[in-house]
Image (spheres, helix red, strand yellow):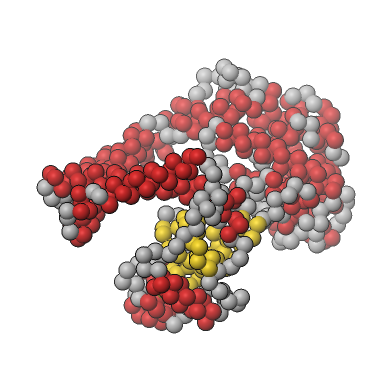
Amino acid sequence: MLLNLMRVEDVEPEYLLRASFHQFQREKEAPALLAQADDFMTQAENVDLGSEEESALAKEYYKMDQQLLLTKRKVASIAQKPEYIVKFLQVAGRFLDVSIDGEQYGWGVLTSFKKRGGGSAGEAGKLASLSNRPTYTIEVLLRCVDRHFDSVDEKAMKEDRSNATLLWRGTSKSCRPPKPGDDEKLISMRVFTIGLEHIDRVSAVRIFTPTAIQSPEARKKVSMAVKEVKKRFPDGIPLLDPIKDLKIKDSNFTTLMERADALSKRLAAHKLTTEFPEETRVRLIKAYEDRMDLKERSRVLRQEAKSFQTMAMKDDLKKMKRVLKKLGHVDANGVIQTKGRTACEINTADELVVTELIFTGVFKTLTVEQCVALLSAMTFGEPMKDDEATQGMKSFLLNPFYKLQEVAKTVVQMQISCNLDVDEDEFLNKFNPAMMEAVFQWCKGVKFLDVQKLTGSFEGTTIRTLRRLEELVRQICTAAKAIGDHELEAKFEEGSKLLKRDIVFCSSLYL
């Protein structure tokens, strides 16, 4: 749409954004957000922090505590590197301190550790090289409470208590860390799948873990062992020494450790710690945290209101134009180039990827049937699940798909480099080769009944994919004609003829 607007004289995309209903709605919401921000600021000023001295001490203590927290996170980010930590995760039973999505789950027990395939050979290796997914998968038993219990009534909670221990898998979306006051019957040990980035600390302690952790009895034994370990080490579970055990030789790490130690000592010697009762210190720090939280919420709302008063999607529009310039669709003055004219003709699939396929010459080395089959990966609506779809594919179809993946990766990385909010894995998974074999056989004249046996989808999905594919092929014909590539135009005209036949393209499926 942006390219089509840019090719028309005296039409500015910015004008359409300013005149949009979306922009009207945003501007209408701004006053309410500002009023809410003022309300939060008033609440922040009314938070009781005691005397001026207590307020100043709470502020000083809070800032040091935040610096210590930030320093510890930097320390953890270095200690979490595979070259330091992986060798201690090879055997089950290791105590790990885990936090997921900002929630502290505390000490859990390692049950298994797996390394994902990282080689470049074979089909799976080539696909893995296009992915940014975590290399390591860690399973750990954690104490947790099903979030379901936070919203149900007392009667339903009593009915579910007996079943709480039967569930053995957990995620951060379905389970939360235990809180003080939680009913012990609602707390269960479940297996969470995490990455290295979720490990805060690694303990020197290891315990025996049963093989069949699916059974409630086995997980109960582990839970009792965890409690026993905590009882034996009241001053804290011993950790692996980062220098002696993890063998970290990073000079920056040593500096961070010294800074964390110095901040801890300053907090321990702070006036709020030494001269005030524990209850008073906790109350003042909690009050100051509440004040800072309210001020932050007020700031965020004001910033949001300000963004609502400016033109919607203005930044996204600039980023999209930057992508078009880098890919060569427009020049520095915003004038449409040959690539841009080609992309203007495509709307059934991702026009940037299709255009790159055309201009990189991918279609020139392929037969008509291979070209059409490759395009089916862009019109088949279901997302790809890992490398299942490529298993068993013939090389004459698999190699073109790898080229498509490489082109798609180039496009998405260009978008990311221009700061567009795009998920690379999600973008690449849009291109699903599951229908390529079926489309190839369809172009060879095979009957629909036999073609359908090659797919794992319903007949309606296959028909819809073929119809969308034929539309995309016609659009590429038009694009090839627009840029004067008669050879490519003839190839896809033939592809359209091969596609458009039999029951799939009947005017009515009832006939």
- Depth check: 321 or 49 in front? 49
Locate residue 177 relative to residue 282 in the image: left or right. Answer: right
Q: In the image, is residue 159 above or below residue 306?
A: below
Residue that protrudes farthest toward the top in the picture:
333
Q: Position of residue 366 (x, y in %)?
A: 85, 38
- Depth check: 227 or 371 in front? 227
* Residue in the image at 72% along x and 57% along y: 388
Residue that protrudes farthest toward the front in the picture:
244
- Depth check: 249 or 456 in front? 249
Q: Do we see residue 439 in this rendering?
A: no
Picture quarter containing residue 386?
bottom right
Locate residue 141 relative to residue 152 in the image: left or right. Answer: right
Locate residue 325 relative to residue 360 in the image: left or right. Answer: left
* Residue in the image at 71% along x and 39% along y: 406
Q: In the image, is residue 211 above or below residue 32?
A: below
Q: Position of residue 364 (x, y in %)?
A: 83, 33
Q: In the image, is residue 479 above or below residue 48?
A: above
| Count of number-bearing discs | 0
- Depth check: 73 or 207 in front? 207
- Location of the C terminus by quadrant is bottom right
- Location of the N terminus by quadrant is top right
Q: Position of residue 16 (x, y in %)?
A: 47, 30
Q: Do we see residue 477 in this rendering?
A: yes
* Residue in the image at 11% along x and 47% along y: 51
Q: In the image, is residue 151 above or below residue 390?
A: below
Q: Position of residue 311 (x, y in %)?
A: 40, 31
* Residue in the image at 26% along x and 40% along y: 34
